[in-house]
Amino acid sequence: GAGVSQSPRYKVAKRGQDVALRCDPISGHVSLFWYQQALGQGPEFLTYFQNEAQLDKSGLPSDRFFAERPEGSVSTLKIQRTQQEDSAVYLCASSRRTRTSGSTDTQYFGPGTRLTVL
Amino acid sequence: TQLLEQSPQFLSIQEGENLTVYCNSSSVFSSLQWYRQEPGEGPVLLVTVVTGGEVKKLKRLTFQFGDARKDSSLHITAAQPGDTGLYLCAGARDSNYQLIWGAGTKLIIKP
């Protein structure tokens, strides 16, 4: 079956512009994660959805970042008034089960969206 | 502050050589995962280790979880150019589904 897809793959924005990044998870996957990966670094957690509920947004770096998953499938990460420090690859991952205590469900990652803010 | 330290950050070796990548922390993890990421792609899970002292093998790759569950290693035997990529470790804690990621080891295998 299809994996996680993300669009656009590349986005160039001028400083101050708003951007919207889309994630299509694997069908039926309950959990959805957004990560930010700076050049030469590992991913950093941004936010987590269980179905349509955003259960954790502790990793969002500022109130300019907003994520939603209104119908429990497709998710959108929106960044308002982009800044140069927002330049990074934004990764989306989905997993089959909920994140219960002690579980290590496999996360399947999309290819990411490379955002460059000029 | 990087809670998971990976070393080396960069490694370039000839095809056929052996190598070991390390993932160290002062924190205890309930499990630790190793991923490989290629340019323009997302990370792909290689293995999950759960038990202290556990050793798992995946063809020429051997993964070990430290006895105290604070560190892990990835050993590659007779490296091939196809092993080239960014290797990431990520730790999980019982009470939190968030993965703690290392910064990665960029591995280049020259033919």
Image (tube, coloured by chain):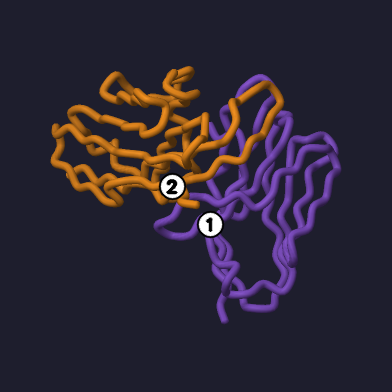
Chain colours: A orange, B purple
Q: Residue furthest bottom?
A: B111
Circle 2 Cα neighbour tier, 10 Å, few/some/many (<14 / 14–19 / ≥20): many
Residue nearer the viewer, B81 or A68: A68
Q: Is residue B54 above or below residue B68?
A: below
Residue nearer the viewer, B51 or A3: A3
Question: Horizontal and vertical percent for residue A72?
Answer: 42, 26
Q: Is residue A87 visible?
A: yes
Q: Are marks 2 and 1 on the same chain?
A: no
Q: Secondary structure at mark 1?
A: strand
Name the residue type under label 2: Gly
Question: Horizontal and vertical percent for residue A18?
Answer: 17, 32
Seen at 67% across and 55% down, the residue is: B21
Q: Chain of mark 2?
A: A
Q: Chain of mark 1?
A: B
Which residue position holds label 1? B86
Quick check: marks 2 and 1 in contact, CB under 8 Å? no
Which residue position holds label 2? A110
Seen at 46% across and 51% down, the residue is: A2
Q: Is residue A46 above or below residue A9?
A: above
Name the residue type under label 1: Leu
Distance between the alpha carbons at the discs numbered 2 and 1: 16 Å
Seen at 40% across and 57% down, the residue is: B40
Seen at 43% across and 60% down, the residue is: B39
Circle 1 Cα neighbour tier, 10 Å, few/some/many (<14 / 14–19 / ≥20): many
